[in-house]
């Protein structure tokens, strides 16, 4: 690799870091070429070298978000079934400062995704994928006898993702009430209730 | 009231309608003085007569959103307890085109609210108020024997609002899967499970 190439890659990394900092602080509403330049201590001209305009900047921001989400530290899923389901849920919730920043950016991205057909379709596919992951864990739980035998795992997957995303929103707007411990308690309550639905009390 | 005053009010109404149309189509990311002017077929100069800048425009948009949400058509709450809780939940969900537009704008508003301290505090207060309403219905349900006697209504209120807001997001991104009938089924499933928690099967 030529030195020029390496410099280019290093600079691209700096640009991505600056985009992330702007998003974490100001969301997509505050994501402008000028704000990214300011976060880098560089000129707007330098940033326009990487992004032709706002749309390219937003697309890059979503790429970073997807990549960081995929590579974020996660709880090991442990045993199949409900333990894996629990790990999926806790891995989504804003339980750490990094998790809070990532969720804040995801929630912020809904605004742009709702008004751009490509981003909208990508988001829909993303949620289908998450529900499929949740459902696979629920299907294991059903086979393992952790759920009532008549449980509808597709509906439960929709229920669990709804609960989880809504808890993310509550927690982002009220982190003092929805501390990591309380979020975890609420998630455990919810998952316990799935396992008990229609079953005699333990 | 002088004719000039009436004209001013009529024009202010037109401006508000234009702001709403821009929000419903493009969200807060697309809310600019220029877009509002275009939606009215007017000059940007006319719109700047009403709003000094973007911040005033966003504040006005949130006022309209709050007012329209307060005055939207609602299901009658019916009997106290779980029937009222169900009405609260169904009144939030995007079950009609108007409800979908309103929710799309609320979800879009989270981006700006997360990066503005005043809007953030207003949103937190709003969610506290909704949870208090849900909790009042849950307290009635507890007194009426519709919930297990050891139910923690504060936690259940947080659970119900989380489920409801998360279902709003799923439905906005996938209205084909989350039809009004399916949203209602999922909500009924969820509310039934609250009533059954820890109780023998019916």
Image (spheres, coloured by chain):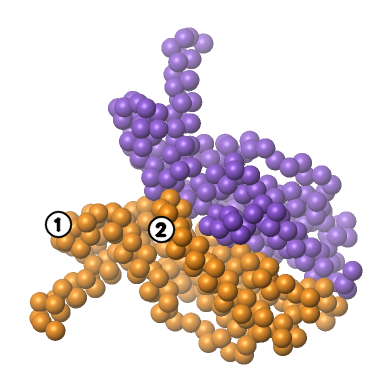
Chain colours: A purple, B orange
Q: Tell me: residue B28, above or below residue B185.
A: above
Tell me if B130 is positioned left or right of B38 in this view. right
Query: To which chain does the residue with label 1 belong?
Result: B
In depth, the one of A86 and A155 nearer the eye is A86
In depth, the one of A75 and A195 nearer the eye is A75
Q: Which disc is residue A195 wearing? A: none
Q: Quadrant of the C terminus of chain B?
A: bottom right
In the rendered image, residue B16, in percent from the top left (x then y), is placed at: 27, 69
Observer able to see residue B44: yes
In depth, the one of A80 and B28 nearer the eye is B28
Query: To which chain does the residue with label 2 belong?
Result: B
Q: What residue do we see at 75% from left, 86% from top?
A: B145
Q: Secondary structure at mark 2?
A: helix
Q: What residue do we see at 80% from left, 51% from top?
A: A83
Q: Between marks 1 and 2, how big is the CA–CA gap?
A: 28 Å
Q: Tell me: residue B83, above or below residue A64.
A: below
Pair 1/2: label in front: 2
Disc 2 crowd rating (10 Å Cα; few below 14, some 14-19, many 20+) is few
Q: Secondary structure at mark 1?
A: helix
In the rendered image, residue A1, in percent from the top left (x then y), is placed at: 51, 11
In the rendered image, residue B180, in percent from the top left (x then y), is placed at: 55, 73
Q: Which residue is mark 2?
A: B118
Tell me if B132 is positioned left or right of B3 in this view. right
Label 1 and label 2 in one chain: yes
In the rendered image, residue B37, in percent from the top left (x then y), is placed at: 21, 59
Observer able to see residue A59: no
Give the mark nearest the N terminus, 1 or 2.
Answer: 1
Q: Which disc is residue B45 wearing? A: 1
Q: What residue do we see at 77% from left, 57% from top?
A: A138
Query: In which quadrant of the rendered view does residue A33 lie?
Result: top left
């Amino acid at each position: 690799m030529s030195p020029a190439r390496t410099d280019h890659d290093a600079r691209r990394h700096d640009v991505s870091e600056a985009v992330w900092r702007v998003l974490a602080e100001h969301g997509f509403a505050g994501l402008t070429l000028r704000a990214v330049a300011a976060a880098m201590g560089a000129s707007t001209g330098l940033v326009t070298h990487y992004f032709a305009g706002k749309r390219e900047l937003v697309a890059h921001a979503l790429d970073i978000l997807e990549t960081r989400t995929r590579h974020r530290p996660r709880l090991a899923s442990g045993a199949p079934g409900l333990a894996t389901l629990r790990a999926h849920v806790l891995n989504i919730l804003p339980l750490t400062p990094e998790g809070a920043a990532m969720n804040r950016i995801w929630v912020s991205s809904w605004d742009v995704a709702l008004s751009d057909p490509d981003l909208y379709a990508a988001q829909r596919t993303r949620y289908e994928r998450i529900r499929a992951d949740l459902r696979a864990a629920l299907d294991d739980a059903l086979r393992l006898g952790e759920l009532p035998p008549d449980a509808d795992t597709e509906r439960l997957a929709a229920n669990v993702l709804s609960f989880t995303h809504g808890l993310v929103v509550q927690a982002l707007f009220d982190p003092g009430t929805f501390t990591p411990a309380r979020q975890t308690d609420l998630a455990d309550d919810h998952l316990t209730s799935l396992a008990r639905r229609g079953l005699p009390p333990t």
